[in-house]
Image (cartoon, rainbow, N blue to C red):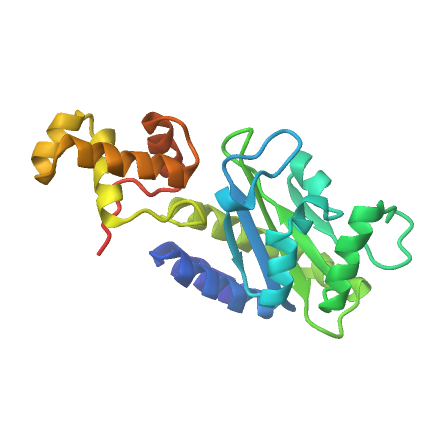
Amino acid sequence: MIAAINYLDRLARATEIEQVWQMFCAEMVRFGFDRLLYGYNHFGTEHSVGSWEDALILSNNDPGYLKKFIEEEYYKHAPLAEWALKNTGARPWAGKGDPSLELNETQARVVALNTSYGLVAGYSVSFATPTPRARGIVSMGARPGLTQQDVNALWERDGVLISVIANMTHLKIISLPHTNERAKLSRRQQEVLNWVADGKTYQDIATIMGVTMGTVEKHLRLVRQKLNVETTPQAVLKASFWNQMFVVKM
């Protein structure tokens, strides 16, 4: 318990997502989980976790596994994906021979992929989210040699503590600025968007930055393209969701 309190103290003082993630990975190893995959998306739907390009994804899994699971969208068909859309809390991975494991063809492909990378036992935690469209989950793969039965016993003993640590880590992560495939704006693009959010007109922004209105419009057009939105107010909203507004970029 003392170790967990020390972790939460360090978590509260952390200021960067990379730092938080490294801490969390190290803490979960202590409980027997050495391969983690975290995802959070503000732009899910009732039936989908949304596009991976809009999501914050953190993982210490093998890059080859991530390429298939994320970029080839295996994650959309993971056995626990449907459950996570409608539920919060923790749930064990189904083991071989589990009568509750009735897989369709696409789900079976996901399980086969996991097995090929040694991901055969673990637990997943689906987080409560602030809006109906937001989705957050962490999948925790157990270290090699542990069976699902071993993991279930581990969770029976330490599951409440692990869930608290995971949930507090999730809340810390979503409070910090983060980037994904879409939220990679240049310093000037970020500056222009900040001035828009501050209520400045295009003419005001051009004067403040010492550029032409055409340059301002060009920057905002590129911002809309990068964020995959149609209007500048949408761009401000999307960047705000990612805590990317008024962030100082060196």
Residue at 69% x, 56% y is 123
Residue closer to the observer: 135 or 76: 76
In this rendering, does residue 193 appear at all? no
Above or below 151: residue 209: above
- Residue 172, percent across and down? 43, 49
Above or below 11: residue 184: above
Q: Residue 113's quadrant in the figure?
A: bottom right
Left or right position of 215 against 123:
left
Residue at the outermost bottom position: 145
Q: Residue 202's quadrant in the figure?
A: top left
- Residue 142, percent across and down? 69, 66
Residue closer to the observer: 26 or 234: 234
Above or below 29: residue 86: above
Residue at 23% x, 30% y is 196
Residue at 40% x, 56% y is 17
Left or right position of 215 against 66:
left
In this rendering, does residue 155 appear at all? yes
Image quadrant holding the N terminus, namely bottom right
Image quadrant holding the C terminus, namely bottom left
- Residue 89, percent across and down? 65, 43
Q: How many marks?
A: 0
Residue at 59% x, 53% y is 71
- Residue 103, percent across and down? 85, 47
